[in-house]
Image (tube, rainbow, N blue to C red):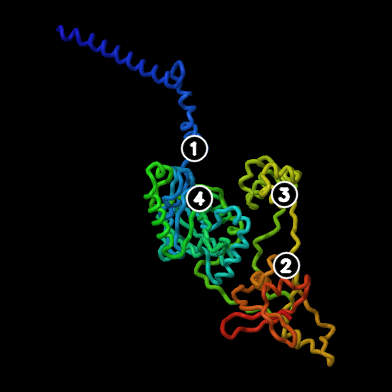
Amino acid sequence: MAWALKLPLTDEVIESGLVQDFDASLSGIGQELGAGAYSMSDVLALPIFKQEESNLPPDSDNKILPFQYVLCAPTSPAVKLHDETLTYLNQGQSYEIRMLDNRKIGELPEITGKMVKSIIRVVFHDRRLQYTEHQQLEGWRWNRPGDRILDLDIPMSVGIIDPRANPTQLNTVEFLWDPSKRTSVFIQVHCISTEFTMRKHGGEKGVPFRIQIDTFKENENGEYTEHLHSASCQVKVFKPKGADRKQKTDREKMEKRAPQEKEKYQPSYETTILTECSPWPEVTYVNNSPSPGFNSTHNSFPVAEGNGSPNHQPEPVVQVADNLLPTATPQDAQQWLHRNRFSPFCRLFTNFSGVDLLKLTREDVIQICGPADGIRLFNALKGRVVRPRLTIYVCQESQQAREQHPKHENGDAAASAFFVYHAIYLEELTVTELTEKIAHLFSISPRQINQIFKQGPTGIHVLVSDEMIQNFQDEVCFVLDTMKDDTSDGYHIILK
């Protein structure tokens, strides 16, 4: 019994001592912090905690995304901690992208048991190249005739339905898939990063690309136009086996760094997870017109005969006039900003209607958006049309017209002959641009035009060069004659 009576006393003594020791330790912490008492707010005010707090996503962003896309390619180990991941790809190699359904139970019930549509694009990462994307891609098209920037490896893909590739959009593919079923799509990127760099001093550094996936659900009219989710990742594309060598080089460099330096870099992950981003602004055009089937072959169209318009109309032009109207609502103004690649400033102009934006002066826009984007936005708002550097008029020669209107004895054509000319506007003053414009005018593929000649003295055929085009007189008129190339299915164009 004596031991039983002493045990509580002993516990009380021990407990009292622990409390005193704990109080002493707290007072020591307070003294080290230079404060009279322990304060958690002082600790949270330290720089390390401020940095961690700034990296935490807002409550609105801390949500589970409906889908997740995983590119089965390792990330580079030579990327700093807070930078975006970078993945190296080999040109033409098939890489798997796993399309994962990440919804909670009961989330988005309207797509349960239904298909969704995903569009994959290869676009530029650098904003400087984004502004000139059309010219960059057209230049690539002429240097690599018949090739595509992005392809689907259909035999290896699983779960995709109705894959399509628009022949006018070399960097885009699309397909339908069922989120409830296993879906993996294999892509091939055929362009390399150094094809879009300025070749100076012999050394070249490849530009980064972005692989972006936009997913849409079906609306009441059966069109896949309602946006669900978008995500992208940064990649660089090398010649075959080049990505493997670059990955090995980065790994060896990291192994040689000091342990303190290694802590500043991300580890290399086996796969690349695409992160959420804004939807691609031009996606509305892709959905408005059905694109040809992925396995469809390119038909060869002969050049139309006759001096009038071609028998079949050209394809719809992508770059249509998109002027902001004063009657536009704030919602319409937001869509206009998205379409014209001003998405970063949508938040600043949330409540601006069309008339509000149009009232902004040049100085106002530059102050809000900065010099580069401000001037671009001001010009877009005012709908300024840039005068072309060179305008030429062309008319297609017709054998039927020559037969119906025989020449007089003096060699002049009959007065009743009537010819219709078409205007061609040139900006770059190159053979490539002229070939593209002529092909578009007569609804044929640019690959069908092999060479362009100009008829010279005594009827000789002079090969047209960039320098010759630069010396054309403005508003000069030409009659186009076509000559079949015996060695291929293409044509030679003769300017008379």
Foreground residue among 185 and 129:
129
428 lies above or below 301: above
| Residue 249, quarter of the rendered image | bottom left
Q: Quadrant of the C terminus?
A: bottom right
Q: What residue is at 24 percent from the left and 12 percent from the top?
A: 11
Q: Residues within 10 Å of mark 2 (few under 14, many from 20)?
A: some
* Relative to 221, 360 lies left or right: right
User: Mark 1: which amino acid?
Assistant: Asn
Q: Is residue 239 visible?
A: yes
Q: Which amino acid type is marked by label 2? A: Tyr
Picture layout, residue 410 above or below residue 438: below
Which corner quadrant holds the N terminus?
A: top left
Q: Residue at x 69, y 73 (%)?
A: 467
165 or 488: which is nearer to us? 488
Q: Position of residue 234 (x, y in %)?
A: 49, 53
Q: CA distance from mark 2 to mark 1?
A: 50 Å
Q: Are marks 3 and 2 in contact (CB under 8 Å)?
A: no
Mark nearer the N terminus (3 vs 2):
3
**Relative vertical location of residue 58 with respect to residue 244 in this rendering, above or below:** above
CA gap between label 3 and label 2 equals 24 Å
Are discs 1 and 4 less than 8 Å apart at CB? no
Looking at the rendered structure, the kind of residue marked 3 is: Phe
Q: Secondary structure at mark 4?
A: strand
Write down the residue under mark 4: 231
Which label belongs to residue 55?
A: 1
Q: Which residue is mark 3?
A: 378
Q: CA distance from mark 4 to mark 2?
A: 38 Å
* Residue 371 x/y as whole percent: 68, 47
The relative height of residue 240 versus residue 223 in the rendered view (above or below) is: below
**Residue that numbered label 2 is attached to:** 425
